[in-house]
Image (cartoon, rainbow, N blue to C red):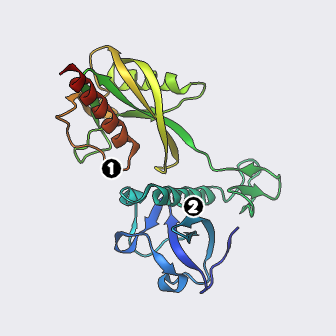
């Protein structure tokens, strides 16, 4: 439930606006509301971390508004709470008015929802499902540099689920569209909430079946097969992409050792 922050409130502060997060000194603020001039603002508790409440305050600060990506190396649970806060802030910002009747909406007191008092429509935060897949070919893994990654990072392939698709169908389609490769033996690994902007990443591993790499230049700068012990710059630890790559490396090493 949203409430007015008083000088008695303290804990972790997720202060978010337009998909950005306030990180003074590069860290999530922790302390009393008075430490950050938040007394009198509207906020709501979105969880707990290390025994202290995590508060969401929807507002912009004068400086230090950055991407939540800066917290990727933090503990998984804390990053997920921050991601929840950023996504909820954007959800409430984009649902000020009802899409059916146009009347002003208000925040639910009992759940993550926006309510229309006129037509009684109820809206929930929308999550976009997407797949991410590591493709193995013997001692090699398929890695690509995405158009949006200009820092030399190479990672596995990913894409959004389309209407009417199963997750396995999405894996096959996205891999074919981006790399011209067919895959087989697709198996689920894990999932990760991904607040950029509102995704749930579902991770898979797959084996190479056929095809020569021909990358989609609209999506990828390049793509290629990399031997497990000679990899380029990888995504940061804590990402599900990094886990998929490391899991594939483990499989390659184990197979190599078994042949010795």
Mark 2 crowd level (few <14, some 14–19, many ≥20, 10 Å Cα): many
| Image quarter hosting the C terminus | top left
From this view, report whether residue 217 is shown above or below residue 2.
above
Q: Residue at x 25, y 46 (%)?
A: 150
Per the image, the residue denoted by label 2 is 89
Depth check, front residue: 92 or 26: 26
Depth check, front residue: 156 or 223: 156
* Residue 133 location (% of width, % of height): 40, 31
Depth check, front residue: 17 or 35: 35
Q: Nearer the viewer, mark 1 or mark 2?
A: 1
C-alpha gap between disc 1 and disc 2: 26 Å
Name the side, left or right, on which 11 lies relative to 232. right
Q: Which mark is residue 237?
A: 1
| First-in-chain label (1 vs 2) | 2
| Image quarter hosting the N terminus | bottom right
Q: Residue at x 32, y 32 (%)?
A: 248
* Residue 78 location (% of width, % of height): 47, 60
């Amino acid at each position: 439930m949203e409430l007015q922050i008083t000088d008695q409130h303290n804990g972790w502060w997720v202060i978010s606006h337009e998909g950005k997060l306030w990180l003074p000194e590069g860290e999530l603020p922790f302390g009393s509301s008075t430490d950050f001039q938040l007394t009198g603002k509207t906020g709501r508790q979105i969880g707990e971390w290390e025994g202290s409440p995590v508060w969401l305050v929807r507002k912009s600060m004068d400086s230090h508004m950055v991407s939540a990506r800066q917290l990727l190396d933090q503990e998984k649970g804390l990053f997920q709470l921050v991601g929840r806060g950023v996504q909820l802030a954007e959800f409430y910002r984009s649902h000020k008015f009802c899409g059916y009747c146009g009347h002003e909406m208000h925040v639910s007191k009992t759940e993550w929802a926006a309510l229309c008092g006129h037509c009684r429509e109820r809206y929930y935060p929308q999550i976009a499902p997407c797949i991410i897949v590591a493709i193995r070919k013997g001692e090699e893994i398929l890695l690509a540099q995405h158009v949006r990654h200009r820092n030399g990072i190479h990672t596995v392939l990913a894409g959004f689920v389309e209407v009417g698709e199963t997750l396995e169908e999405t894996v096959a389609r996205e891999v074919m569209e981006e790399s011209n490769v067919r895959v087989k033996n697709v198996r689920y690994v894990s999932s990760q909430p991904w607040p950029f902007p509102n995704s749930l990443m579902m991770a898979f591993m797959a084996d190479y079946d056929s095809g020569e790499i021909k990358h989609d230049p609209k999506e990828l700068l390049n793509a290629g097969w990399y031997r497990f012990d000679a990899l380029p710059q990888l995504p940061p630890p804590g990402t599900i992409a990094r886990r998929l790559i490391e899991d594939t490396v483990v499989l390659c090493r184990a197979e190599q050792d078994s042949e010795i």
